[in-house]
Amino acid sequence: MREQFDAIVIGAGQAGPPLAERLGQSGRKTALIERHLVGGTCVNTGCIPTKTLVGSARVAQLARRAAEFGISIDAPIGVDMARVKARKDRVAGASHDGVSSWIDGMKNVTFIRGHARFDGPHSIAAGKRLLAAEHIFINVGARARVPDLEGLERIDYLTNSSMMAVDFLPEHLLIVGGSYIGLEFAQMYRRFGAAVTVVEMQDRLISREDEDVSAAVHEILEGEGVTIRLRAECLGFEPGPRGVRMSIDCAEDATPLDGSHVLLAVGRTPNTGDLGLEHAGIDTDAKGHIVVDDALETSVRGVYALGEANGRGAFTHTSYNDFQIVAANLLDGEQRRVSDRIDCYALYIDPPLGRVGQTEREVRESQRKALIGTRPMERVGRAREFGDTRGFMKVLVDAENGQVLGASILGMSGDEVVHSLLDVMYAKQPYSIVARAMHIHPTVTELLPTLLSGLEPLD
């Protein structure tokens, strides 16, 4: 017997629960299906646990620098990884429990444990239960991509998810991938006391960013003792004397690397391969992402895809924004679109990188008339006072209408400061709004008016 619902939400990640709640509040009989952990990647293996670890690593680093601030610490600085993990588990566990309690209290929402698969355009099988609904919302997320590398099957390797179970200090952590996830773990574990080597196939780290940003991040990590190997090709693995031996063919040095553990940080794969999408006629792209339009509707009318699975954003905030867009359009009579939002994200090394809008490279490629402003963090009084002047600020502005095109803020509080620009960008207001506003001293944000008052033509 098939159970009839008004709406079915598949996946209890960042978009699923708030959408289920809104649907239930609107009087719609709603089913929320989850096969594993509520809260999705962010709560369980992503943002919350990893940034909790980043916090512990930062304290360890500050303790080592205590003498610079006139503080004496008599005992040697030690890191108890079991206690570090226990703290991470408590913080992430509280978030997971909070989401669970939230779901339990939702009205008109039935929570179902099980793996959901389509058996028709608007019908779902979840274990032994058969369900149907006019509206179905897919929020199944993604997982770490495991590349096809020679010898990988011969060793034990870690991903960002399995790293969450580590309660010891690796002697030498080899990280495959010099992008956001890999670099966060690199600095984190170096600060915990491990030897760390990052292996990247490109000729620079985080190649999505401008070259000056990549170079500055490279300098920050090497300054803390992280070894970086670029232009790595033909990677291979085998058991080694210290745990694992990694062969690399690098332009600079092809000497094999001997490490104790390997972390794969080479991208994400959408969890769409076992959803039975072919039975519903739902289109996917070559990477397995569900194809959606500007309102997040799939090729089947009434079926929507939100979060990492749709390939329109790989972050918690993009997933939540997907929920906001779908809820506003279906329940509030609005006409919101994915294309209205501005790209924004952060790299959570210390100091962090805050990014909004276009890069300098993208602005140059657009061939539009633009202005640019840059200032080193050494100009920021707050950064000098707190002993961290690494990084810089860069802003790009449209020369004709004065609107901010993009910004990179690598430095103390960069992930927070960048929102001052993001908000005026979304409001489509000129940079002069920020430049003329009075900012509090001493803060990092107070440098923005100075930065914006010194804009020059982008050659």
Image (cartoon, grey):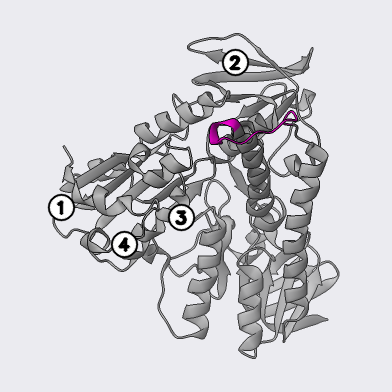
* Residue under the point 65% across and 80% down: 21
Mark before the other along the chain sequence, 3 or 1: 1
Q: Earlier in the sequence, mark 1 or mark 4?
A: 1
The residue under label 4 is 425
Give amino acid for label 2. Answer: Ile
In front: 161, or 456?
A: 456
Q: Residues within 10 Å of mark 1 (few under 14, many from 20)?
A: some
Residue beneath disc 3: 416
| Residue 258 spot, x, y in % from top left | 70, 15
- Quadrant location of the N terminus? bottom right
Label 2 to label 4, Cα distance in Å?
Answer: 43 Å
- The nearer-to-camera label among 2 and 1 is 1
The secondary structure type at the circle numbered 1 is loop
Magenta segment main secondary structure: loop
* Mark 3 vs mark 1, CA separation in Å: 26 Å
Looking at the image, is mark 2 or mark 4 earlier in the sequence?
2
**Residue 265 visible here:** no
Helix, strand or loop under label 4: helix
Residue depicted at 37% across the width and 54% down the height: 445
- Mark 1 and mark 4 residues within 8 Å of each other at the beta carbon: no
Q: CA distance from mark 4 to mark 3?
A: 15 Å
Residue under label 1? 399
- Residue 48 on the magenta span: no
Measure how far apart labels 3 and 2 are at the Cα level: 38 Å
Residue 304 higher or lower than 454, as above or below: below
Q: Which residues are magenta?
A: 67-77
The amino acid type of the residue labelled 1 equals Ala
Residue marked by disc 2: 248
